[in-house]
Amino acid sequence: MVLEQLESPMCSYTLALLLEPIELYAHHVHDLLILKFQNKSNINILRKLVQILLELNNENIKKFKDIHEDIFESPIETDLHVVQDKESLLSKLIIQLLEGHRNEDITYSVSAAKMIAKKLFETSEDKTSGIDSGIFIKIFTHYAFPQLSAVFDIYEDRYGRSIQAAIQHQCKSQIEVECFQDIVEYTRSPAGYHVKILRQALDQNPVDYITLIRIFIGHEGKDLSEIKLEYSKVFDETLDQTIQDRIDILEIKRLFLTIITIGDDPIQNDSSETRSDERDRSNSVSEVINSVAKWVVQLNRNRSLETLKNYFKWLK
């Protein structure tokens, strides 16, 4: 791992704010691979990798691979094969996602969707065989998202069963099923998919701050607004309210809420509940972090790394 584990979690989140989203993803993926290699995490690393790669378009996949190789002096594919059997279904899935060959058309073919849905149904009915794994993976990694969505809808409407039935027939383990199901959920509703991941991160004990910071910082304002709206529909409370209730570290709570609320500081009243010695100790850090978070919001609107660098020169 290029970066040592930092003593203060605030240092980690400040560093995350300094990075371009794709570079942040590269660091997170590398750290996940290190954890798997050292067997120091009980989370499923490969599913996390799928979650990160799934939302990158072809251009960003290429940028992600270039950044990873530049920083860590090794292709991401090589690092993946060190920790995972390259012949496994999930390894092949991740490698195909890393190819960045997804069709990005916004249109789709109904006839093609019907043909694929029929093939998926027929193979799920045949208990002795399935679609060739390479073809199955390419359907999920090369087809445009509108085309995939049409396949899923036609399969369920015509054959009266969830697309998960076809996935389960093709997969040998529960984690394989979950990874392909993640692609289904993201295809149908990116905002809804991120809401699920956010809630899972908030429900963990301890809270999965790494996933939270990746989603909050890695999404443009429009995407984050859609996630917030979907969150309110699903859980009957705002994302702001959940952050208020679930996050115990004041500075991190302020950082998240500043990004979510486009630069406001909605927890000013919480300072009365903080002991005076804690407030004094964290005050200067909070001011800097709050300023950084506000700057990130502006950067997402008109991203300029050079401007950000100049800002931090001024802070020094």
Image (cartoon, rainbow, N blue to C red):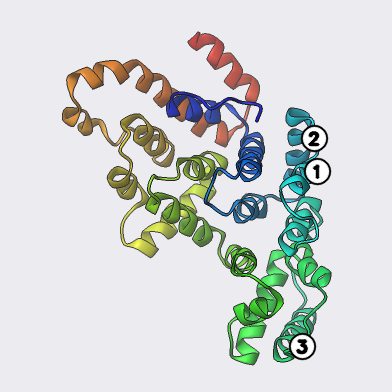
Q: Which mark is residue 78?
A: 1
Image quarter of the N terminus:
top right
Question: Quadrant of residue 127 in the image?
Answer: bottom right
Q: Secondary structure at mark 1?
A: helix
Image side of residue 101 versus residue 243, left or right: right
Q: Marks 1 and 3: CB-CB under 8 Å?
A: no
Residue at x 79% of width, y 30% of height: 73
Q: Nearer the viewer, residue 130 or 294?
A: 130
Q: Image quadrant of residue 79?
A: top right
Instruction: Determine whether label 2 and label 1 are within 8 Å by CB.
Output: yes
Q: Secondary structure at mark 3?
A: loop
Q: Give the vertical position of 247 relative to 172 (above or below).
A: above
Q: Earlier in the sequence, mark 1 or mark 3?
A: 1
Q: Secondary structure at mark 2?
A: loop
Seen from the viewer's position, the closer of residues 214 and 92 is 92
Residue carrying label 2: 74
Residue lying at 60% horizontally and 41% vertically, measured from the top left = 35
Q: CA distance from mark 2 to mark 1?
A: 7 Å
Image coordinates for residue 103, horizontal then vertical, percent: 79, 61
Please give the name of the residue rendered at 76% of the width and 59% of the height, measured from the top-left corner: 104
Residue 201 horizontal/vertical position (percent): 44, 50
Q: CA distance from mark 2 to mark 3?
A: 40 Å
Q: Amino acid at mark 1?
A: Thr
